[in-house]
Image (tube, rainbow, N blue to C red):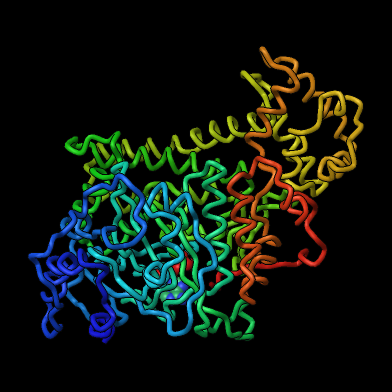
Amino acid sequence: MAQRRGFSWLWLWGVAGLAAVNCRLRSVLEGSAGLPRLPGNESVHRPGSCETQARLAASFDFWTLSSEYLIDVLPIDPVKENYVRKVKNCIFSVVFPTPLKSRVRLVAVTKEVLEDILDLDLSVSETNDFIQLVSGEKIVFGSIPLAHRYGGHQFGVWADQLGDGRAHLIGIHVNRKGEKWELQLKGSGKTPYSRNGDGRAVLRSSVREFLCSEALYHLGIPTSRAASLVVSDDEVWRDQFYNGNIVKERGAVVLRIAKSWFRIGSLEILAHYGELDLLRTLLDFIIQEHFPSVDAKEPNRYVDFFSVVVSETAQLIALWMSVGFAHGVCNTDNFSLLSITIDYGPFGFMEAYNPDFVPNISDDEKRYKIGNQANIGMFNLNKLLQALNPLLDHRQKKLAAQILEEYSVLYYARFRELFKAKLGLLGEKEDDDDLIAFLLHLMKETEADFTMTFRQLSEITQNQLLELSIPQQFWALKKISQHGLFPAWVSRYLSRLKSNMNDSDSKRRKRMTTVNPKYVLKNWMAESAVQKAEINDFSEVRLLQQVLQHPFQKHSAAEKAGYSSPTPSWAKDLRVSCSS
Ligand code: AMP
Ligand code: MG
C-alpha cells in the first residue's frame, strides 16, 4: 500500500514543518480507516500558506506549499489506497509520489522560475532537500500530493478516464507577488490513473519537455514552465518505436508549474458521468480563480467562459503556427482550459515548410499534422461545448454555438497579424494574405526551412533582395531563391514594404528580428542533448536552455554548435513517437 509507505518517508523540513502539514493532511488522510497517525505538534508556529515572502528562500524551512486552496472546494476521492481503478465523484485523489530508488542527479534547473516564481534562491538547488523535493522523495511542508481525475478524446475518440497517471500535484505556491502556481512532478510514480503505465517518464522525453516548455515561454507563447529536471538510474523499459524493440531507459522527473493544470478533459469526464453538481463546482472554481473577465455571478457565466476559451485557444494555435510548432498530440486531455501549451510529448518544430508535417510517427492518420492544428482546436472546443451543454439552457446553447463559429475568424485574424509581423508589414493591404500564402507556397515547393527563411528575411537588406544577391550564410533563402517564382515574390514584397508608413530598412530588420527566432528546439538539437545526458553529460541541455532563453539573439556558443545552421545529415531521419 503506497499510502502506508508514504508515511514512512514523509519528512517535514525544519522546525516550522513539524506542525504544519499535519492538520490538513491528517484530516484528509485519517478520514479513511487504518492509516497510521502522523507525528506532529500543532502548537508549533505555522507559517500561513498564503503568507508571502520578501526575500528569496535559501532553504525550505519557511518555504511553503499548500493544497488547501484546491481541496477545500474540490472534492477528493474517498478511497485512499493507491491502486488503479475507475474513480468517481471527485476531482482529485490523494496519492504520494513513489521515490526513485537509485541515485538522483540534477540535470538542470531554471533560475528564473525558481527565483521569480517560486521565491527560491538558486543556491537551494544545490541542496539535498531540493533533490528530494523535486524527485518526489520528500513532501514539503503543507503539501498534500494529488493526482487529478480527467478524461478526454484521444485521436478523435472518447477514451474515458485518463487522469494524472504519472504526475503528482505537490501543492500550490503563493509567491511574493501574490500569484498562485501549481507545482506538478511528472514521472513520479503510479497513481489510481496509471492504467497500464508504470508511472514513470524517461530521460529523453523529460529533457524535451523541460527544454521546449521554456523555449515556448521565451518565444512569447503561453505554456507551462519547467523548474527542474532530475534523472536517476532506475530502469524504465520502453518500446520507443512500437516495433517490439524494448529498451532499458532511465527514469527522470520534471518539476513543472502552471497557474492551473485543468484541461478540457477535466470537464468532459464529469459531463460524461452525469456528475453535474461537480461540473458546476469545478467550473465555478475555475472561473473564479482564472477568468477575471468573467463575472462569476452572471447566469451567462459558462457561455462567457466558453467565449474566452474559444478566443484564447485560437490565439494559442495561431502562435504555435507562427513558430512552426506542432504539438503532436492535441487530444482534449492535453488542451488546457487556460489555453496554455501543456503535456509536451512528440512535438516538433517544422523544418522544411510542409503543412503535412507530423512530428509523431505513431500518428498514422496524420490527424495532428501541423496544418490541421487549427481544425483540431475547433474539434476540441466542440468537445468542451458538449461538456458544458448540460449546464446551458436553450438560449445559451445557441449563443455558445455562435461563439464557436467565430473561432475561425479569430484564428485567421491572429494568424494574419502574426505572419504580417514576421514579414515586417505595417498597416493593412488587400493583398497581404496573398503575399504570405505565396511565400509559404514557395517554401513548400523548395522545402526551405521555415524558421530560418523568416529569420534570414529579417537579416537581409532590401538592397540585397532587390539585386537577388543572397549571401552564402543565408542558406534557407538560397534554397527558396531557387524557385522560378522567387523574383516575382521579392518584387511584390519590396513594393509592399514601400507602403509601410514611417519605416526604414533598419527599422524593418530590427522589428523582424524580434519576432522571427534564430533558435528553436529542432529535434536534432534535443536529440544531441539527450544523447549526452544519457551518459550524464548535461552540458548541452544547459547550453540549449541558455540559448532558448534568448531565441532572437545571436549566441556565439549556439553558432558554434550549429543551431542556426542546416540540420546535420546524421539527424535527417530522426523520429519521435508517443513513447515517453
Ligand atoms: P499523454 O499521452 O502523455 O498525454 O498521456 C495520456 C494519459 O496516459 C494520461 O492519463 C497519462 O497520465 C497516462 N500516461 C502516459 N504515460 C504513462 C505512464 N508511463 N504511466 C502511467 N500513466 C501514463
Ligand atoms: Mg497528457
Q: Position of residue 396 (x, y in %)?
A: 26, 38
Q: In which quarter of the image is residue 58?
A: bottom left
Image-based side of 6 in relation to 502, left or right: left
Residue beneath the point at 62% across and 86% down: 244
Quarter occupied by the N terminus = bottom left
As displayed, is residue 465 above or below residue 282? above
- Total count of labels: 0
Q: Position of residue 209 (x, y in %)?
A: 53, 61
Image-based side of 73 in relation to 123, left or right: left
Kindly tell me whether residue 89 is visible in this rendering: no
Residue beneath the point at 69% across and 22% down: 507
508 vs 130, nearest the viewer: 130
What is the residue that sits farthest to the top in this orientation?
A: 502
Image-based side of 366 in relation to 275, left or right: right
Residue beneath the point at 67% across and 12% down: 502
What is the residue that sits farthest to the left in this orientation?
A: 43
Kindly tell me whether residue 259 is visible in this rendering: yes
As displayed, is residue 404 above or below residue 44? above
Q: Where is residue 144 in the image (x, y as percent from the top left)?
A: 24, 67
Q: Quadrant of ligand 2?
A: bottom left
Q: Position of residue 488 (x, y in %)?
A: 85, 28
Q: Quadrant of residue 527?
A: bottom right
500 vs 389, nearest the viewer: 500
